Image (cartoon, rainbow, N blue to C red):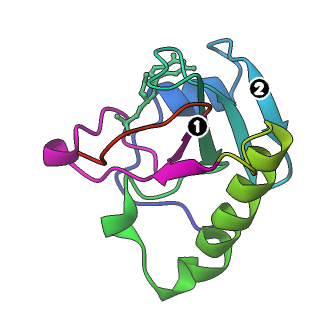
Amino acid sequence: MSETPGYDRDNVFARILRDEIPSDRVYEDGEFIAFRDINPAAPTHIVLIPRGEPPAGPAGLDDGDAGWAGRMFVVASRIAAQEGLAEGGYRLVVNNGPDAGQEVPHLHMHILGGAGLGPIA
Ligand code: 5GP
């Protein structure tokens, strides 16, 4: 992944990546880390983030990002299975911008499950 112009190096997820803020990591590889959300919206709520300096959200993606962005789905489904969510099901959420309530400007995917989640919005 190339560096994203304007990337905020002090955002919370950048600081978690640098271990300046502790996190309960459940997965990591050379491209991604995943950790439990500090304010869970479901019994299981994990945040999956790419390492490096990705765009703030999916609106910043272009064709050159298709490889790692696609692999995020593969990794998310692997983590969901690891967390025991494969049978009951789960929801993957990617927020973009204020109307979605996005707080952290480092592209990320929420993995939610462990109970019936109800309607999307
Ligand atoms: P967004 O709203 O940007 O899509 O999601 C950001 C998520 O990051 C929120 O669900 C929020 O609870 C979570 N979050 C914010 N700060 C921290 C933190 O310091 N540690 C952890 N584990 N999660 C955080």
* Relative height, residue 45 to residue 99 (above, below): above
Residue for point 43% across, 81% down: 62
Find the residue positioned furthest to the left. 99
Q: SS for tag 2?
A: strand
Residue for point 49% across, 20% down: 40
Residue for point 70% across, 69% down: 71
Query: Which label sits in the foreground, 1 or 2?
Result: 1
Name the disc covering residue 25, or none.
2
Counting from the top left corner in percent of width and height, residue 33 is at 73, 41
Counting from the top left corner in percent of width and height, residue 44 is at 62, 27
Q: Residues within 10 Å of mark 1 (few under 14, many from 20)?
A: many
**Stretch of the chain drawn in magenta:** 89-113
Q: Is residue 90 left or right of residue 80?
A: left
Q: Nearer the viewer, residue 46 or 108?
A: 46
> What residue did someone put label 1 on?
113
Of the residues shown, which amino acid type is indicated by label 1?
Gly
Q: Are marks 1 and 2 in contact (CB under 8 Å)?
A: no
Q: Quadrant of the N terminus?
A: bottom right
What's the distance in space between the residues labelled 1 and 2, CA to CA? 17 Å
Counting from the top left corner in percent of width and height, residue 91 is at 51, 50
Q: Is residue 90 magenta?
A: yes
Residue for point 72% across, 42% down: 85
Q: SS for tag 1?
A: strand
* Relative height, residue 74 to residue 95 (above, below): below
Q: Nearer the viewer, residue 7 or 37?
A: 37
